[in-house]
Amino acid sequence: NLIPASCTRLTPDMLPLVSLSETELADISDRIPGGAANIQDIYPLAPLQEGVVFHHSLSDEVDPYVTPALFRIGDEQTLNSFCESLQFIIDRHDVLRTAILWRQREKPLQVVLREARLPVTWLPVQQGDDVLAKMQGLCAPEVQWMELEKAPLMQLTVAAEADGGYLVLLQHHHVVIDHVGLEVVQQE
């Protein structure tokens, strides 16, 4: 890629894989947290990714390409290590720091961010709640959806259990992680 690390303004000549005007680049920079300084690269989608984004665009509520995985983690230290490890992997792999800008565009674009923080949401739990049932409800296919225009396309939802453990829902989007990518994440 031709975007220098200290770049604060993108120009068309920095992007050999896509043809964008100065105005389009300014608009993209405005949509990314941290602006141009947080953009590492921009390029088009692969043909299979275009199909995934098409299906995503059909609904604001359900996306068949969001994959949930539910984990039980025994203690806070292990939970913190899990979150730190995922952030390390996101920091290490460009594709995991990629946002897909598709709204109001003729062609969707992949925008690789220099930094993307793993979103962690805590599920409110009250005494007597069936935490497992709540988290399993969040795994249902009819509630899977993720905003593609915000990197990373991976997110966590955490719920504390009464015994001091945690249920952790990891969701990721197939547009950036396929089965091979998921194996790499698991190995790392």
Image: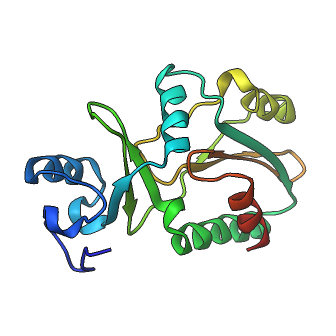
Give x and y (percent) for residue 71: 83, 51
The residue lying toward the viewer, choosing from 78 and 98, is 98
Placement of the N terminus among the 4 image quadrants: bottom left
The residue lying toward the viewer, choosing from 105 and 9, is 105
Q: Is residue 8 left or right of 68 when viewed as pictured?
A: left
Report whether residue 10 is seen.
no
Give x and y (percent) for residue 39: 30, 64
Placement of the C terminus among the 4 image quadrants: bottom right
Q: Residue, x 70% and y 40% (percent of image)?
A: 67
Give x and y (percent) for residue 58: 49, 20
Q: Residue, x 55% and y 36% (percent of image)?
A: 52
Q: Is residue 108 above or below residue 143?
A: below
Report whether residue 35 is seen.
yes
How are the residues colored?
rainbow
The residue lying toward the viewer, choosing from 48 and 39, is 48
The residue lying toward the viewer, choosing from 165 and 151, is 151
Q: Residue, x 68% and y 51% (percent of image)?
A: 178
The quarter of the displayed image where residue 96 is located? bottom right
Q: Is residue 166 above or below residue 57?
A: below
